[in-house]
Amino acid sequence: MLNFFFPPMTDRSYEPELMDDPQCDQKKLVRTVKQFKLINRLFSRSHSLLKKLCLADMTDPVKTYRFLDIGAGGADLAIWLAKQCRKKEIQIEIVCLDYDPIIAAFARRAVADFPEISVVEGSAFDLEPLGTFDFVFTNHFLHHLTFDQIRIVIAQIDLVCTKRSILNDLKRSSMGYLGYSLVAGLFFRNSFAFYDGRLSILRGFTERELQTEILDQLPQLALSISIIAPARIVLIGTH
């Protein structure tokens, strides 16, 4: 019972998540994507990160800013950003990238009323065909990758990003695991959100890991690490 709430956090897990299986239950996958919106509001801190690191820098009234959301899921964060830009009369073009055709199809339906958002089915390992972007953002994406893959993605981001990248993910934490377990057990049913969300935390990162495996390995890039409650770890790049 103790391991159910407090599993070992010493080493990063590489156990695959259920939703990453191409043969997974499609109905559960779509239900999980629908639940991302609430999960993001409760846990991700993405709204505050986007306000501080993107919206605050969108000060040119005649410029159309380009924003890339990698691993965009159901596009709930892209829709939130588009609404904020409409309120502030900021011109923006948002590209949501996801490799999963089922998730991409769901996102296209979700953004039907937002012509400033386009959904592209593709790989984060080949970003150059998408053009350049002022801002590149990821949320709950890096923990799906190995460190070697993360370095490749960051190098790709550096090729296309002209201003700032914000890579928001999970800090591996016993308290974060316990808190998510309690909330997800109550609210996220008939989906992959409970099992995969807990596993995602075990696949998350410590500050030391990102320092040694990413920053120290990519000294030519201007990257920094920020820790944000609750149990968030963010890689911020200046390009």
Image: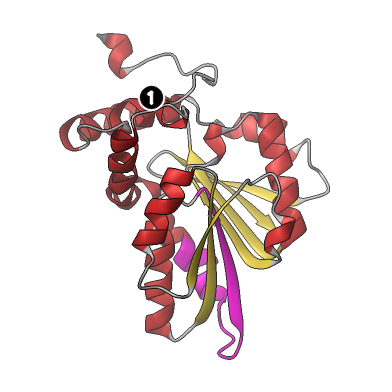
220 vs 178, left or right, is right
Instruction: For the N terminus, give its image quadrant.
Output: top left
Residue 171, image x, y percentages: 48, 35
* Quadrant showing the C terminus: bottom right
Q: Which residues are magenta?
A: 50-71
Residue 39 appears in the rendering: no
> Residue at coordinates 59% horizontally, 86% vertically from top-left?
60
Does 200 sit left or right of 26 as displayed? right
Quarter of the image where one finds residue 194 = top left
Q: Magenta span has 57? A: yes
In this rendering, is residue 159 above or below 29? below
Front in this rendered view, residue 62 or 183: 62
Instruction: Examine the image and state in which quarter residue 179 appears.
Output: top left
Residue wearing tag 1:
174
Inspect this view and state whether residue 236 appears: yes
Label 1 amino acid? Ser
In front of the other: 192 or 25: 25
Where residue 176 appears, x then y in whole percent? Answer: 36, 32
Q: Nearer the viewer, residue 115 or 78?
A: 115
Report helix, strand or loop for mark 1.
helix
* The magenta stretch spans residue 238: no
Query: In the picture shown, does residue 204 fall above or below 219?
Result: above
Point out residue 187 in the picture as x, y percentages from the top left corner. Answer: 18, 38
Binning the other alpha carbons within 10 Å of mark 1 as few (below 14), some (14 to 19) or many (20 upward) gives: some
